[in-house]
Image: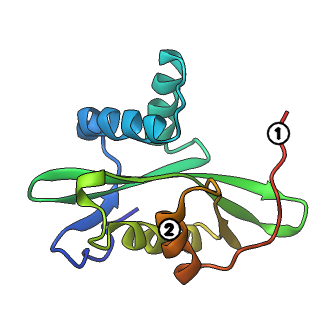
Amino acid sequence: MSERNPLPSAGRIRPLAPADRAAWDRLWAGYLTFYDSGVAPEVTEATWTRLLDPAAPMFALVAEDEAGVFGLAQCVLHASTWSTTPYCYLNDLFVDPARRGGGAGRALIEAVQAEADARGAGRVYWMTHETNAVARQLYDRVATRSGFIQYQR
């Protein structure tokens, strides 16, 4: 992965790096809090390790500027029974609440699409909670709702 186009606010999108651990921990905790969720410490550690492992079918991008890292996008690449090319699931997208509205979310989604294209993925998709109205405004501008409903066990 190479550095992506700059953000409108003079920042940039780039691949996650080992030196980003403290910022990633803060953003990851903020993301989990936003969704009123949590994971065991060993899951957090495994996620961090896999995101940096070039052999893992995952990748992560971060938004940063002179003040540091303030946004992240974490993706999983997987095979599909509907395509000969892999799909890219944008598993987690989070921008520090104090930095929202400056174009980082859109820039991260666009950078994910570019990275997915570079990796041969035929589709990029993601989910959000139905109550996440602010994010859905952006998503409705940059993508098409599939109409599918998710079920879990």
Q: Earlier in the sequence, mark 2 or mark 1?
A: 2
Up/down of 82 relative to 91, above or below: below
| Residue at 30% over, 51% down | 96
The CA span between labels 2 and 1 is 28 Å
Q: At label 1, which amino acid type do we have?
A: Gln
Up/down of 26 relative to 58, above or below: above
Specify whether residue 53 is in view.
no
Position of residue 80 measured from the top left corner of the image (x, y, whole percent) = 83, 59
Q: At label 2, which amino acid type do we have?
A: Glu
Q: Of the numbered discs in the image, which one, if any, rests on residue 152?
A: 1
> Where does label 2 land, which residue?
115
Instruction: Write down the quadrant of residue 98 in the picture.
Output: bottom left
Residue depth check, mark 2 versus mark 1: number of the one nearer the observer: 1
Q: Say which of 13 and 27 sits in front.
A: 27
Instruction: Write down the quadrant of residue 149 in the picture.
Output: bottom right
Q: Say which of 142 and 3 sits in front.
A: 142
Left/right placement of residue 18 relative to residue 49 reads left
Placement of the C terminus among the 4 image quadrants: top right
Left/right placement of residue 13 relative to residue 10 reads right
Q: Of the numbered discs in the image, which one, if any, rests on residue 42?
A: none
Up/down of 32 relative to 106, above or below: above
Position of residue 112 measured from the top left corner of the image (x, y, whole percent) = 49, 66
Placement of the N terminus among the 4 image quadrants: bottom left
Instruction: Write down the quadrant of residue 144 in the picture.
Output: bottom right
Q: Residue furthest right?
A: 81
| Residue at 40% over, 37% down | 28
Q: Say which of 86 and 136 sits in front.
A: 136
Q: Residue furthest bottom?
A: 141
Disc 2 is placed on an element classified as: helix
Position of residue 39 measured from the top left corner of the image (x, y, whole percent) = 54, 24
| Residue at 33% over, 71% down | 4
